[in-house]
Structure formats: structure tokens, C-alpha cells
Image: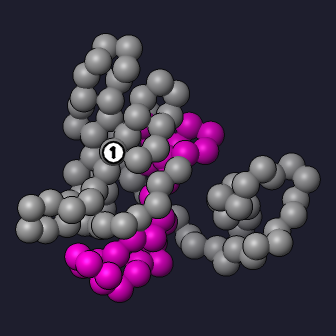
């Protein structure tokens, strides 16, 4: 789950007998859910966040219950309703840059 502006986004996860790639957005101003572009792959146990008007999903698993971890990062653009694969960068716990407020921003801003 992540949010962009006044909308919340929910994607992927566990279905009854399979992993899902479906995504939905909730618009609080009209109290309505709408389907959006599905993620490129089914996934579970992933992390999600948003930066600068884009949503991101990172990591996750290929299978149910402690399956192999994914080296995975995708970006959602709500303007064009589309997901794009992004390159993964190595992060270090002691990264310090004066104009960057989070490790996620370091990951997305550096050309690694």
C-alpha cells in the first residue's frame, strides 16, 4: 500500500490459492475504489512507498509462505496508469547526503 496525494493504492498479495498482480486505488473525495494497471508480476510480502508523485513496490516473494525473495523494484506512474521496472541499487545503512531525506530517495536518485 502507498498513497499519492489524496488517493490510496493497494496492489498484489495473497489470493485464495494464488498470488495476485491486481491493483486498486481509493479516492477519498468521492469514496470510491477503481481498478488500475496490474503489476507486471504476481507478488507477495513486498514493500511499497511513494516519492514525488510516483508509487514504488520493492522486493516480495515468488511463492506463498517464505518463498524465495525477489530482487525487484517497479514504479507506478498514475498519470499514464503504467508500471516500469527500475534498477536496484545497493544501499548502506550509513548513507548520508544533505539533500536526501530517506534511503528510498538515495536508491531512486543515484545512477547506480
Q: Name the residue at the left extreme.
A: 17
- Name the residue rendered at 78%, 50% in the picture: 101
Q: Which residues are magenta?
A: 50-78
80 in relation to 16, above or below: above
Q: Give the image location of residue 80, x and y in percent.
A: 40, 38
Residue 90 is left or right of residue 5, and the answer is right
Q: Quadrant of residue 26?
A: top left
Q: How is the image coloured?
A: one colour
Name the residue tied to disc 1. 10
| Residue plotted at (27% across, 46% down) | 23
Q: Is residue 103 above or below residue 92?
A: above
Q: Position of residue 8 (x, y in %)?
A: 40, 34
What percent of the width, then of the height, locates residue 52? 62, 40
Residue at the image point whose x is 87% and y is 64% from the top? 96
State the count of labels.
1
Which residue is at the far bottom?
Answer: 68
Q: Is residue 28 magenta?
A: no
User: At x 56% / y 37%, what residue is drawn?
Assistant: 53
Spot the residue most to the right: 98
The C terminus appears in which quarter of the rendering?
bottom right
Does the magenta segment cover residue 75? yes
Which of the two residues, 8 or 55, is positioned nearer the viewer here? Answer: 8
Question: Element at badge 1?
Answer: strand
Left-right relation of 99 to 7: right
What is the crowding at mark 1: few (fewer than 14 residues within 10 Å), some, or many (at least 20)? some
Residue 90, picture quadrant: bottom right
Residue 75 visible in the snapshot = no
* Side (left or right) of 75 relative to 22: right
**Is residue 22 shown above or below 8?**
below
Q: Is residue 43 above or below residue 48?
A: below
Q: Position of residue 6 (x, y in %)?
A: 47, 24
Amino acid at each position: 500500500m502507498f498513497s499519492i496525494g489524496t488517493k490510496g493504492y493497494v496492489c498484489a498479495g495473497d489470493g485464495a490459492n494464488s498470488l495476485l498482480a491486481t491493483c486498486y486505488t481509493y479516492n477519498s473525495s468521492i469514496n470510491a475504489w477503481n481498478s488500475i494497471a496490474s503489476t507486471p508480476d504476481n507478488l507477495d510480502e513486498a514493500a511499497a512507498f511513494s516519492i514525488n508523485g510516483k508509487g514504488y513496490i520493492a522486493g516480495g516473494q515468488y511463492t506463498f509462505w517464505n518463498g524465495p525473495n525477489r530482487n525487484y523494484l517497479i514504479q507506478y506512474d498514475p498519470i499514464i496508469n503504467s508500471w516500469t521496472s527500475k534498477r536496484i541499487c545497493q544501499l548502506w545503512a550509513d548513507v548520508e547526503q544533505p539533500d536526501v531525506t530517506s534511503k528510498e530517495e538515495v536508491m531512486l536518485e543515484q545512477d547506480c
